[in-house]
Structure formats: structure tokens, C-alpha cells
Amino acid sequence: MIEASIIVERIEAALPGARVQVQDLTGTMDHYKAVVISEHFAGKSLVARHRAIYQALAEEMKGPIHALTLEVFTPEEWDAQG
């Protein structure tokens, strides 16, 4: 089990300036959804964006996090979402 706040901290440390929202999907503290908005994603493919998040959570993905759904955006893409 891992607290959502720890996931937020890890992602923010890897992607300074990112806006991160994490939601526990099942209440079991091991299935999460993360929405990450970062300038770091500009010009990067979806795979590269996901890879950056998984690298930030490498240790957590080995155990405490069982499933992670990602939504990743640049600030411009996020703003276009409305």
C-alpha cells in the first residue's frame, strides 16, 4: 500500500513544475489514476510521457502500486480540454 501523496511527491520531484492529481480508484491504496500536466511532455510521444512517470515511480511499481492509469498533458493540451 502507498499513500496518494507519496505518488504525487515522486512525480513532482521527477517533473519539477508539474501539476499532479492522484486518485485511489479502489480504496485499497494500490490502484491509482494520475493526471499529470507538465511542460516536460511538449514534443514527446504518449509512450515517452508514460515512461517518464513510470521512471519516477520505478520502486513503487515493483510492489506497492498494482495498477496505474495515466492521463498526461502539456499545459496547452490541458487548457484545450476545457
Image (spheres, rainbow, N blue to C red):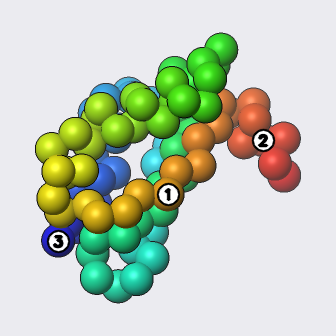
Q: Secondary structure at mark 2?
A: helix
Residue carrying label 3: 1
Res. 79 mark: 2
Residue carrying label 1: 69
Foreground tag (1 vs 2): 1
Q: Furthest residue to the bottom?
A: 27
Q: Residues within 10 Å of mark 1 (few under 14, many from 20)?
A: some
Foreground tag (3 vs 2): 3
Q: Secondary structure at mark 3?
A: loop
Earlier residue among tags 3 and 2 = 3
Tell which of 32 and 63 is nearer to you: 63
Residue type highlighted by circle 1 = Thr
Q: Secondary structure at mark 1?
A: strand
Side (left or right) of 46 relative to 79? left
Side (left or right) of 29 relative to 40? left
Q: CA distance from mark 3 to mark 1?
A: 16 Å
- Residue 21 visible in the picture: no
Tell which of 59 and 79 is nearer to you: 59
Q: Residues within 10 Å of mark 3 (few under 14, many from 20)?
A: few
In the image, residue 35 lies at what x, y percent? 54, 52
Residue type highlighted by circle 2 = Asp
In the image, residue 55 lies at what x, y percent? 30, 32
Taking the spot 28% from the left edge, 35% from the top edge, the residue there is 56
Side (left or right) of 47 relative to 63? right
Where, by quadrant of the figure, is residue 79 drawn? top right
Q: CA distance from mark 1 to mark 2?
A: 21 Å
Taking the spot 33% from the left edge, 51% from the top edge, the residue there is 8
